[in-house]
């Protein structure tokens, strides 16, 4: 597991405490490039609803209130593939996962028909009120209990498990495919 952080205020994240971060590529809280450069590894989050072309700027689409919606997911994945990427990530709360998974499974041919197929993964928000991050097994069990959804192996990539006043803490379960920074 790789610990990482995200924040609407990148200055709040100490690179000595977090080598890996997720930051906003666009929207109200967009990070300037020099903020991404402060960290060894990062990925970018897009937030705009109705604009699948932002998949060229960011690996992750933020699906929550005031940001993108479930209906934006498949077009985002298709644009990631058309831009030559082989992966995309979706951030959402556990309660949104059933609708998101149904939309992505229903649109499979839409984003596998590109020159390169794209695989999708989930970074879920589950604030489980414990002093340590949950394991992937614990997150998947909670998802199954709440909604009956079972994810294919490897689809759960991360969990935002602890909200903070300045930063949110997450854990990454997959291999380290964060983009390199300049730090």
Image (cartoon, rainbow, N blue to C red):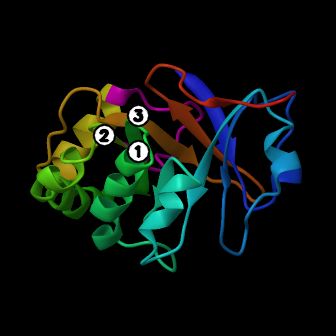
Which residue is tagged 1? 88
Secondary structure under badge 2? Answer: loop
Residue farthest along the front direction in this orientation: 115
Q: Nearer the viewer, residue 167 or 180?
A: 180
Give the residue number, with chain letter if any, for mark 3.
Answer: 157
Residue at mark 3 to residue at mark 2: CA–CA distance: 15 Å
Q: Is residue 10 left or right of residue 124?
A: right
Is 113 situated left or right of 154 in this image? left
Q: Is residue 155 left or right of residue 44?
A: left
- The residue that label 2 is drawn on is 118
Viewed as shown, does residue 116 lie left or right of 103? right
Secondary structure of the residue carrying numbered label 1 = strand
Is mark 1 in CB contact (under 8 Å) with mark 2? yes
Nearer to us in this view, 85 or 22: 85
Mark 3 or mark 2: which comes first in sequence? 2
Q: What secondary structure is found at the residue carrying circle 3?
A: strand
Report whether residue 4 is seen: yes
Residue 137 x/y as whole percent: 30, 27
Q: Quadrant of residue 166?
A: bottom right
Q: Residue 125: x percent and y percent?
A: 45, 52
Residue at the image position 46 percent from the left and 46 percent from the top: 128
Q: Nearer the viewer, mark 1 or mark 3?
A: 1
- Cα separation, mark 1 vs mark 2, equals 7 Å
């Amino acid at each position: 597991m790789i610990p990482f952080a995200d924040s609407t205020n990148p200055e709040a994240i100490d690179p000595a405490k977090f080598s890996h971060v997720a930051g906003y590529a666009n929207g109200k809280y967009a990070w300037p490039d020099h903020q991404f450069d402060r960290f060894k590894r990062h990925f970018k989050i897009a937030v705009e609803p109705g604009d699948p072309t932002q998949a060229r700027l960011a690996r992750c689409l933020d699906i929550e209130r005031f940001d993108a919606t479930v209906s934006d997911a498949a077009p985002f994945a298709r644009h990631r593939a058309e831009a030559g990427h082989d992966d995309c990530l979706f951030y959402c709360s556990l309660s949104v996962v059933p609708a998101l998974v149904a939309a992505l499974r229903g649109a499979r041919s839409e984003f596998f028909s590109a020159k390169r197929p794209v695989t999708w993964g989930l970074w879920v928000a589950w604030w489980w009120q414990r002093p340590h991050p949950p394991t992937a097994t614990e997150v998947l069990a909670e998802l199954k209990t709440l909604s009956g959804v079972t994810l294919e192996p490897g689809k759960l990539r991360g969990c935002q498990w602890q909200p903070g006043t300045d930063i949110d803490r997450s854990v990454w379960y997959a291999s380290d495919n964060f983009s390199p920074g300049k730090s």
